[in-house]
Structure formats: C-alpha cells, structure tokens
Amino acid sequence: MTTTPTKTNTAPTHKLYRVVKGRMKEDKSIWTEVAACWPHKDGSGFNVKFKFNEAPAAGAEYVMRRDTRTSA
C-alpha cells in the first residue's frame, strides 16, 4: 500500500479526541485531544500524528472531527 504524504507545515484538517462519558446523566463528557490529522493528497486516507502514547481507556470512544480553525 502506498500513501501520499502531505506537507507537514500545513495546519491539520481534523483532530482526534478521546471522549469519556460522564458517570452520571448530569456529568459532562471529557474530550481530550490526542492527535492531529492531515488528508492524503489522493483523498483516500489520513496521516495521523499522536500527541502522546496511550492505551485505550475503558469506556472511552475515539472521535475524529474536522478542525474548525482551518479553512479546509
């Protein structure tokens, strides 16, 4: 499989977050940014740069969202 890397000096278009739901109904979910993502030039994938190494947290889900600070 061949990937097409993007320029690393451009802003990421998406961010990956770890979301841990609150224990009680009134508790807010905790969103922690864990990675930044750049699309491949051919549009068929992403390069992902993690902020730190982590094991998946029990009860957490991972959500990728478009980075609204970019113009992409």
Image (tube, rainbow, N blue to C red):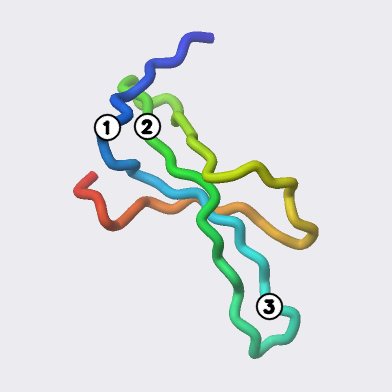
Instruction: Return the mark for residue 9.
Output: 1
Report the side of 5 relative to 59 (left or right).
Answer: left
Quadrant in which the C terminus appears: top left
- Identify which residue is drawn at 29% across, 25% down: 7
Q: Is mark 3 on a helix, strand or loop?
A: loop
C-beta proximity under 8 Å, tags 2 and 1? no
Q: Which one is in front, 42 or 14?
A: 14
Three-letter amino acid code at disc 2? Pro
- Is 31 located above or below residue 12 in the figure? below
Residue lying farthest to the front in this orientation: 52
Q: Label 2 neighbourhood size at 10 Å, few (<14), some (14-19), many (20+)? A: some
Count of residue discs: 3
- Identify which residue is drawn at 45% across, 29% down: 47
Q: Name the residue under label 3.
A: 22
The percent coordinates of residue 24 (x first, y second) are 73, 86
- Identify which residue is drawn at 53% across, 40% down: 50
